[in-house]
Image (cartoon, grey):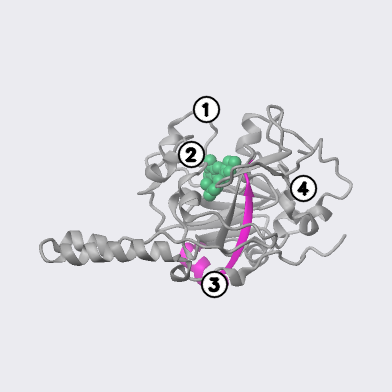
Amino acid sequence: MTSLFKSIPVRSSEITPKDTYLSRRDFMKAATVATGAALLAACAPTAADDLQNAKPVPTSDATDELGNVVNTYDDITNYNNYYEFTTDKSGVARLAKNFTTSPWTVEVSGLVNNPKTFGIEDLLKDFQQEERIYRLRCVEAWSMVIPWTGFSLASLLKIVEPTSDAKYVRFETVLRPEEMPGQGNRSYPWPYQEGLRLDEAMNELGFLATGLYGEPNVPQNGAPIRLVVPWKYGFKSIKSIVKIELVAEEPSTLWSAIQSNEYGFYANVNPNVDHPRWSQGSERRIGELSRRETLMFNGYDEQVAYLYDGMDLGQNF
Ligand SMILES: Nc1nc2c(c(=O)[nH]1)N[C@H]1C(S)=C(S)[C@@H](COP(=O)(O)O)O[C@H]1N2
Ligand SMILES: [Mo]
């Protein structure tokens, strides 16, 4: 088998702290807010404080390695799939606004020599945070380009030392129905679970995202920590993770438990294998008018195709 670690097709230098994301137009908006705050300050100090703390919306013309410009912060944070809150993509941001992301721990356990529960602050401090621009292709045939910050999944797995019996990695989202109204919907087997084969999980593209656009992650995008597996359909990129378990058998996943004929365990982006109800040959990039061709493995074939040598991807969809 070829090396597990292929070169990473990202241009991390493109990602810069929030201030440099500000376009001139947004800078002007921010300046207007500041002026308003100054005017208000004379009579209403608290309102002025709120306005001064209001963050301008970051924007960027950074691109991925294929030249795709990143989506706007506004698109990325207001068009979401997060069924624990709602199935309405434009409603997630509002419902998730007050979701508690601190304190937060991630238990890494199962078939490992060094099981460990990490506080989110340890994950931010002990793992070198880097920036990666990744394409996200939802199984529903829309897509975005997202500048994440975080660290490689492989680097975390190496610390806990999977045993030779470990063949798969299972991920679990927090179960907190009192804060997540969608978890009251009994048609779904909560908590959300996902899984990867261990060798897939060790591929250097696998990423645990803690931030977005140089800012800490926001609840609607899976704060404080979510998986990003850019060569697979978006539903594999599980949000708000509290548990990562090394196991011997292929784990059950939320979407294949509900509809195994439509959502398989592998879920690799593949323009040649259609969803039973729609074509996967093209996609709608949020913010664009015409459709784009969908790329094999979402354009990451050089990095990941070796993982599926000899597999029938029509059967293992
Ligand atoms: N826990 C959890 N993770 C989830 C989902 C979800 O409903 N719950 N939706 C998935 C789907 S279908 C997609 S396309 C991506 C969307 O990520 P984004 O909203 O950050 O763009 O999150 C994935 N992770
Ligand atoms: Mo999705």
The reply to whether the residue tagged 2 has its Cβ within 8 angstroms of ligand 1 is yes
The reply to whether the residue tagged 1 has its Cβ within 8 angstroms of ligand 1 is no
Amino acid type, mark 1: Ser
Residue 240 is labelled as none
Examine the rendered structure and indicate whether residue 189 appears above or below residue 60.
above
Distance of label 3 from label 4 (alpha carbons)? 34 Å
**Image point 41% across, 55% down: which residue?**
101
Relative horizontal placement of residue 203, taking residue 69 as reference (left or right): right
Residue that badge 3 annotates:
126
Q: Is residue 302 visible?
A: yes
Residue that badge 1 annotates:
187
Residue that badge 4 annotates:
296
Amino acid type, mark 4: Met
Residue 124 lies in magenta, yes or no?
Answer: yes
Q: Say which label, 1 or 2, has the lower sequence index.
A: 2
Distance of label 3 from label 1 (alpha carbons)? 39 Å
Residue that badge 2 annotates:
89
Distance of label 1 from label 2 (alpha carbons)? 18 Å
Foreground mark, 4 or 1, reads: 4
